[in-house]
């Protein structure tokens, strides 16, 4: 059973470009969570999605950031017009239905904005 | 606001010795989960051990065990027979009250000395 998959593992973008981060949950998992880890900090919750629904985006910056989890395909975290402060590791986690506390983390995507 | 505190930014331990990493948390819930994650240089988040608050027995996974003091809201991780591969950042995490949002501590960097 493959774990949570994220790609790319490393992403370099220039200021002003768009970044798209992908997350495929574990098989059978229908809930996806995105967390961000700034340098020398712990992870911070960004958004919680179920298929075709955003359940909680209270941790998302108000501008430039969006997330989706379509009926088919991976969840995508999109950052428009990236700035240097967006440089961080972005982790996706998934959980099985009815077990939101059982979150399994992917390997993360490290975004570097130059 | 719910908090998770790791008061030791860095710890060192001799190979084969035992080390304890501390974590305190604050929650208004009576039933919840607590987690320890390991983050090696690869930056992947690896679940080390999980404790369910309603269980009085401390969780154990091979060389890893916890000392869970519910009244004191303390959740320390003990690593026995430390190995070089244990060197990593260790994060304590607790979901926010009644939700799925994990709150992470700031981490403890563990060094294992040969």
Image (tube, grey):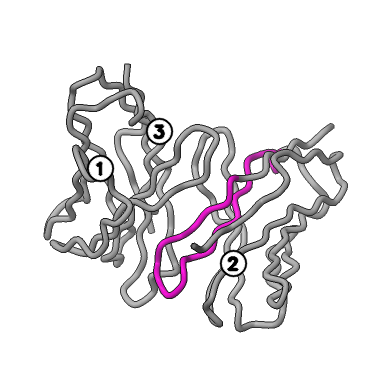
Q: Is residue A114 left or right of residue B28?
A: left
Q: Secondary structure at mark 3?
A: strand
Determine whether B45 is above or below B71 in the image: above
Q: Name the residue beneath numbered marker 2.
A: B26
Q: Nearer the viewer, residue B86 or B111?
A: B111
* Residue A15 position within the rendered picture, expressed as x and y whole percent measured from the top left: 24, 19
- Measured along the vertical axis of the image, is residue A88 above or below residue A26? above
Chain containing the residue with disc 2 = B
Q: Helix or strand or loop: what does disc 2 sit on?
A: strand
**Classed neighbour count for the residue bearing mark 1: other residues with Cα under 10 Å, few (<14), some (14–19), many (≥20):** many
Residue placed under numbered mark 1 in the picture: A22
Label 3 CA crowd tier, 10 Å (few <14, some 14–19, many 20+):
some
First-in-chain label (1 vs 3): 1
Residue range of the region highlighted in magenta in the rendering:
B85-106
Identify the residue shown where x is 72% and y is 65%. Answer: B66
Q: Position of residue A12 (x, y in %)?
A: 30, 22
Q: Nearer the viewer, residue B68 or B48?
A: B68
Q: CA distance from mark 1 to mark 3?
A: 15 Å
Instruction: Tell me the residue that label 3 is attached to.
Output: A88
Chain holding disc 1: A
Question: Closer to the camera: disc 1 or disc 2?
Answer: 2
């Amino acid at each position: 059973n493959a774990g949570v998959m994220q790609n790319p593992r490393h992403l370099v973008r220039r200021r002003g470009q768009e970044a798209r981060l992908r997350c495929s949950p574990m098989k059978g998992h229908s809930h996806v969570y995105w967390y961000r880890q700034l340098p020398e900090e712990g992870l911070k919750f960004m958004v919680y999605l179920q298929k075709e629904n955003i359940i909680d985006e209270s941790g998302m910056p108000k501008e430039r950031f969006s997330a989706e989890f379509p009926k088919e395909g991976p969840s995508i975290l999109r950052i428009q017009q990236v700035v240097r402060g967006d440089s961080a590791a972005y982790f996706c986690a998934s959980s099985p239905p009815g077990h939101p506390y059982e979150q399994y983390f992917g390997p993360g995507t490290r975004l570097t904005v130059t | 606001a719910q908090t998770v505190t790791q008061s030791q930014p860095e710890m060192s331990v001799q190979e084969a010795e035992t080390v304890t990493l501390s974590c305190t948390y604050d929650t208004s819930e009576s039933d919840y989960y607590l987690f320890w994650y390991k983050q090696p240089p690869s930056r992947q988040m690896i679940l080390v051990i999980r404790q369910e608050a309603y269980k009085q027995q401390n969780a154990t996974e091979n060389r890893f065990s916890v000392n869970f003091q519910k009244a004191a809201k303390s959740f320390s991780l003990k690593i026995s027979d430390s190995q070089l591969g244990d060197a990593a950042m260790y994060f304590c995490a607790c979901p926010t009250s009644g939700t799925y949002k994990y709150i992470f501590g700031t981490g403890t960097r563990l060094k294992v000395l040969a």
